[in-house]
Amino acid sequence: MPRIGVVTGKAPSLHVVAEDISAVYAELGHQVRPFFRPVPFFEAKQLFDKSIIFMPFDPTYVTPYLLSQRDYRRVGIDSAFYTTVEGRPIRAMMPDWFKRDAEVIAVSEYVRSKLEEAEVRVLDVIHHGLDLRKLEKVAPDKEALRRLTGGDVVFGVVASSHRRKGLDLLAKAIALVQDKIGAGFYVFTEPQAKPYFAGLKRTYVDARFGKLDRQSILRLIASMDFYVCSSLAEGFCLPALEAQAFGVPVIYPDCAPINEHVDPRFNFPFAWEDVEVYSERLGIAFELHLYRPEAMAERIVEAYGLFKDSPEEYRRMGEGARRHVAEKFEARRLYPRFSKYLNL
């Protein structure tokens, strides 16, 4: 069987996807090895026969990985480039050979549309998948989060402190509801986001973002009663998919690409109002889907009431969300589609 190298960067979120892809192909009988750095073609020839590269399409740092794909093909290593982006790549920062030579597979229809606007050739869309067998081994501890937050129903989020994650808007929504309901809020983030939540009732900020292993993060998500996706811009939003897999309903802005994989029948969408294009010396013009904190707050209050007053309906929603993920986002169904582009 051909040896497959799964190449990505250093970020923990990239490792998650690379490891899941690796596990699927190992189960199919291949020799698979993940690499968390660029692998030059002269080294790659000794290490693998096929490659799947997963990197965000930010022109400021994706170049070494796109060059690797081009070089791999020149020396006979079939290569699929899997990518995400949270807005529009800035064309002025893209060399001409990006448009000529790059061929990529997008994680969502939204990502496909943004890359095609930048004149990048997109071969396919393969959504992120989850190995549901791993998730079955996760043991939630909902009472632990209730004790930490002091709330009787726990709403939680896992997000960095970057502006596009919308934590400032989540804090405003919490301020709107804290005297109306007895909910607690568990915010797993970076230290820089702590000031947003200063003085809020029943709000626990865990500032260990980037320091826990994946199983610990999954346990936190499984221990929430509701997951709050506060993001203004995403390429996919894997935690919202993971929450649904645990039967944890998601409160989310009804924008792409989040609404590509969060089923509104079993979750709580709210409206967004405008798009702001935002960049900060990066190669991406982030598309921020702006919404009113009041819209999020209304759905939080509604979800809280459902949990307290209609436990059977809450369970029905959780079961529906779990079934939705199992039917459409199981990694063993999705990731073998890369085989077409590896000539396997």
Image: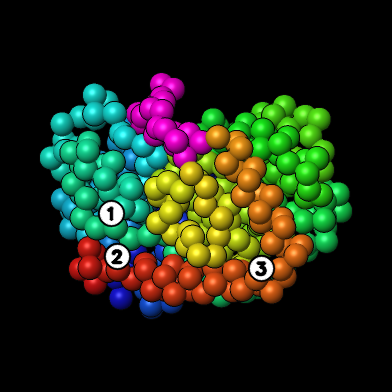
Would you say 139 lies left or right of 265 here? right
Q: Residue at x 77, y 56 (%)?
A: 153
Residue 36 location in percent, x, y?
46, 48
Residue 261 location in percent, x, y?
44, 59
* Residue designated by label 1: 105
- Circle number at residue 338: 2
Q: Residue at x 15, y 43 (%)?
A: 101
Magenta residues, as a range? 272-291
Which amino acid, mark 1?
Answer: Ile
Instruction: Give the image quarter of residue 233.
Output: top left
Please state which of the two labelled residues, at mark 1 or mark 3, is closer to the viewer: 3
* Residue designated by label 3: 314
Quarter of the image for the N terminus: give it: bottom left
Quarter of the image for the C terminus: give it: bottom left
The answer to whether mark 3 and mark 2 are in CB contact below 8 A is: no
The answer to whether mark 1 and mark 2 are in CB contact below 8 A is: yes
Q: Residue at x 44, y 75 (%)?
A: 327
Dot 3: element: helix
- Please tell me how crowded label 2 is: few (under 14), some (14-19), or many (20+) other residues with Cα within 10 Å: many
Dot 2: element: helix
Q: Earlier in the sequence, mark 3 or mark 2?
A: 3
